[in-house]
Amino acid sequence: MSRLTRRDFLRGGAAFLGLSLLGCSRSLPLSLPATREAPTSPPQPKDERLRIGYLPITDASALLIADALGYYKAEGLQPEPLILFRGWSQIAEAFQAGQVDVIHLLMPAAVWMRYFRRFPVKVVAWNHVNGSAFTVRNNLQSLEELAGQAVAIPFWYSIHNVVLQTLLRKAKLEPVLGGTGSLNDRQVRLLVMNPPDMLPALAGGQIAGYIVADPFNALAEVKGVGRVFRFTGDVWRDHACCVVAMREEDLEERPEWAQAVIRAVVRAQLWLRANRHEAPQVLSRYLPHPVEAIAKVFNAPLEPYVAAGAIRNVQWQPRWIDFQPYPYPSYTAALVQALQQTAVEGEVEFLKGLDPTWVARDLVEDRFVRRAVEEAGGPSVFDQPASWEREEAIDA
């Protein structure tokens, strides 16, 4: 397969449909914790300005914590107040228009942006692992009961759509994409919704469930309007949902800047792993959700979910959300294969022509995160293998 060129990207980089941006979160510098010493003389990036966009979900935790604890500044960067967006189309549009430099992005959406929109996005690190769930109304006991009803997903190109359709296939249910027509007794309608709109839709009876990042699943339980039916990390072990995305030109033209950002994000992930009880309070200053819901994601005991069947692969020793930044090529390749079997709205011919192994090399730039992880102590500090390799495990 021929490599896509920079000229191809620039010629084809059409913007998303215009959608308004929402307000900013405040920068909240706190005192630095003693996870590792800040560099006494950090290398000075050529352009110190840093503009970050995020959605109000715990997937953004590493980007937020790096801001809150002053890690970007410790690397010689000058972050502007972080910008909060309600949905994936809005944040992708702002990124493509150059209004933000760094975002957390759904990994499948990065595939779509680079190979369909032909925009030169690069995945430079994972932002977290797991951190999502399939939540249903309280009286729903089986997947089969979804027949004839609607379920919300955050974006067609999302791990949520991939996992949900994996579950539906196992239950011999057929996904119907959007629309308003009648459904037969083996069909489930999939609707795209912005994450903040899902809980009200579930509470109001417009949908039977939703599959999305947290804390919206935890929030449904806190408010008593729904329950976690299955964790996505129990279907695909330690999957990435959101990744750290940058523009390819930034990696080429200001590598010191890119390295500084990623070093701060890696440091934030280490802090999150070591400070799970403190993290919700800090994150609540960026996320417009009750601390109780955020804390549930980080610290809830998982034994009740094992008993309820929301966790079935106990041998994986899953966490509701966890953190490790290295973007495994095996995951990218497996994700492309999964997308090729997943129904999505719009043009899909581009997916059929993608070679999964080639995409794993072309979409991801891992040299910055590898260096940052090595500087932090190596893969073992994230309980990862020294080989920088892993085997994917998927079990619906």
Image (cartoon, rainbow, N blue to C red):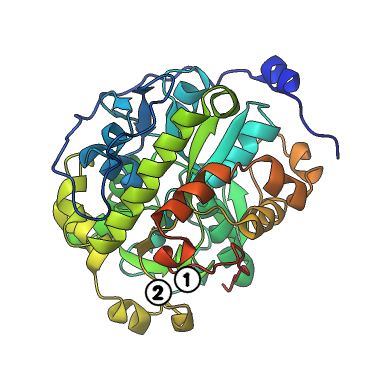
Residue 145 visible in the shown view: no
The alpha-carbon separation of the residues under discs 1 and 2 comes to: 8 Å
Q: Residues within 10 Å of mark 2 (few under 14, many from 20)?
A: many
Residue 68 marker: none
Q: Is residue 187 above or below residue 13?
A: below
Going 34% across and 41% down the picture, which residue do you hit? 63
SS assignment at label 2: loop
Amino acid type at image mark 1: Asp
Viewport quadrant of the C terminus: bottom right
Q: Which residue is mark 2?
A: 310
- Relative placement, left or right, of 75 versus 275 is right
Going 54% across and 59% down the picture, which residue do you hit? 164
How far across and how far down the image is residue 255, in percent?
Answer: 52, 30
Viewport quadrant of the N terminus: top right
Residue 278 visible in the shown view: yes
Going 30% across and 67% down the picture, which residue do you hit? 138
- Tell me the mark number nearer the camera, choosing from 1 and 2: 1
When asked about the image quadrant of residue 186, the answer is bottom right
- Relative placement, left or right, of 92 versus 49 is right
SS assignment at label 1: helix
* Extreme-right residue of the structure: 1
Task: Report the front residue among 79 and 103.
Answer: 79
Q: Which residue is mark 1?
A: 234
